[in-house]
Every structure is written in structure tokens, then in C-alpha cells.
Amino acid sequence: MKVLLLRIAHARSGDKGDTANVGVIARREEYYPFLRTELTAKRVKAHFAGIVEGPVERFELPNLWALNFLLHDALGGGGTLSLKNDAQGKTLSSAMLRMEVDIPPTIILPDEGHV
């Protein structure tokens, strides 16, 4: 079943210069292995096509059930140089959560009203 990543994770984002940082945190421990498999650097780069000009790096934080992505060359030079509306990358976490993922039947989703 295809769902938005929002159903099984939440996210935060920010910046360091021209590099955006997006952390994706599983809503439940049992979702983390799926996120590790599904959210590759390559997939995230494709999801942000046209926004991220450089490489995407992924870091795993299993004790937090989280993945952290560095999106290089994503902010048009950074906060003081960029002409982009979101020069600090604050909206990229919301954009990440709009990614569609195909979850296996073994994953039990929370009710829609309890996301």
C-alpha cells in the first residue's frame, strides 16, 4: 500500500550554509528498519530533483530510530546569499514527508486521526 512518509515518520530540517539538513524520525520503533531500507540517499536525491544540486549523504541514528540527510548545494548559496524563498531549508522536512512509500502488509499503520 502506498502512503505518505508522514504516516510513519516525522521530520525536522535546517541549514548550514548551502547544505540543508533533514532528519527523519520513525514514529514507532518497528518502522525504523523499513525507513533504513526505503530511504536511501539515491531515493532522497531523486525526491528533491531540481532542488538539490549536489550529493546527498545519509547518516543512521538507530538509537533514535532516525536517519539524517545532508543535501549539498540545495539552498542557492545559503541564508545570506540565496534568492530562494526558503534559504534556510525549513520547509524541506515537510517536502520530505510528502514522499510516497510502498509499505509492506507487515507494517501496522496508526489510525488516520492519530498521526
Image: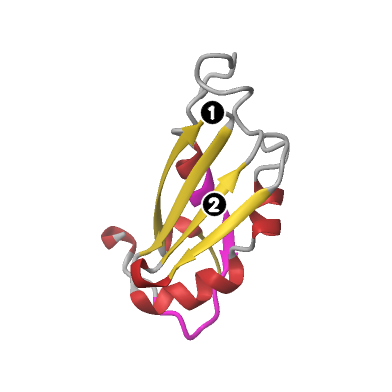
Q: Which residue is mark 2?
A: 69
Q: Residues within 10 Å of mark 2 (few under 14, many from 20)?
A: many
Check residue 3 in the rendering and tell me which mark sits there, or answer none.
Answer: none
Nearer to me, 69 or 114: 69
Among numbered discs 2 and 1, the one appearing first in the sequence = 1
The amino acid sitting under disc 1 is: Gly
Which residue is located at x 51 percent, y 14 percent? 80
Q: Residue at x 65, y 49 (%)?
A: 56
- Was residue 102 drawn as part of the magenta stretch in this picture? yes
Can you say which quadrant of the picture contains the N terminus?
bottom right
In percent of width and height, residue 103 lies at 54, 73
Left or right of 10, for residue 79:
right
Residue picked out by circle 1: 17
Q: Which residues are magenta?
A: 95-108
Please indicate, yes or no, whether residue 98 appears anywhere in the rendered image.
Answer: no
**Residues at circles 2 and 1 in contact by the CB criterion of under 8 Å:** no
The secondary structure type at the circle numbered 2 is strand
Query: What residue type is disc 2 on?
Result: Phe
Q: Is residue 6 visible?
A: yes
Q: Residue furthest left?
A: 114
**Image quarter of residue 31:** bottom left
Q: Nearer the viewer, residue 113 or 85?
A: 85
Dot in front, 2 or 1: 1
Question: How far is the residue under mark 2 from the one under mark 1?
Answer: 15 Å
